[in-house]
Amino acid sequence: MILPVFPVDLERHAGLKKAARVLFKTWPGLKPISHSQALTVIAKGLGYKSFHHAKELSSSWPDARPGMEITEVEWNISEAITAELQAPGNPKVAINLGNLLAYIQTLPLHHLRIFKIYPELLDGRNSFPLLPHDARSPFGKFQHSPIFPLEDGWQIFDND
């Protein structure tokens, strides 16, 4: 299923581009991604093959209510981010799904025009609050991170 993206969402600092910019600047992976990769990840999360596919279809959407809710969009974005994090050539990481979904909720998806036309699509949005920071956590600085590295001898020690 595809969530409609309108031409206004493709303007600078609006909609899809705004969400991609936040993703680009706050990318949770160990290896940075380019802005065009961030655009592709968001577009794939919205149901498109690529950013260019979203751009091609943007002028053809009617204002009809889509059958896709925000929770499905967030899940699709989590799958697109996971695929990018696990792409060949990237450092190996483990993914904490709860923290990843909490991270995705920081992306400004509510700026997409479809959510302004149909604000009820944002209803039922789950909240994934992060637990308070625990200085004794074996995850250290990765405690609230959606990922933690699996290479370079990084491991959790059991002190029990």
Image (spheres, rainbow, N blue to C red):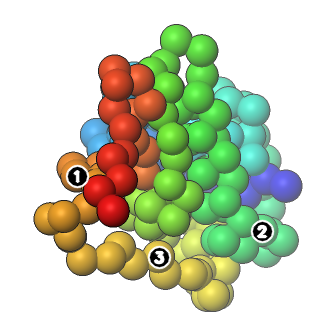
Task: Of the two numbered discs 3 and 1 on the same chain, state the one appearing first in sequence.
Answer: 3
Circle 2: is it few (<14), some (14-19), or many (20+) Cα within 10 Å?
some
Tell whether 146 sits left or right of 70.
left
Closer mark to the observer between disc 2 and disc 3: 3
Q: Position of residue 140 (x, y in %)?
A: 22, 52
Q: Is residue 77 above or below residue 105?
A: above
Q: Which residue is mark 3?
A: 128
Q: Secondary structure at mark 1?
A: helix
Q: Secondary structure at mark 2?
A: loop
Q: Which residue is mark 2?
A: 68
Please give the name of the residue rendered at 26% of the width and 62% of the height, measured from the top-left corner: 137
Asked whether 137 or 37 is in front, the reply is: 137
Q: Residue furthest left?
A: 135
Closer mark to the observer between disc 3 and disc 1: 1
Q: Which residue is mark 1?
A: 140
Please give the name of the residue rendered at 43% of the width and 51% of the height, measured from the top-left corner: 146
Q: Quadrant of the N terminus?
A: bottom right
Query: Do callouts 3 and 1 mark residues in contact (Cβ within 8 Å)?
Result: no
Amino acid under disc 3: Phe
Spatial distance from mark 2 to mark 3, Cα to Cα? Answer: 20 Å
Q: Is residue 9 above or below residue 121?
A: above
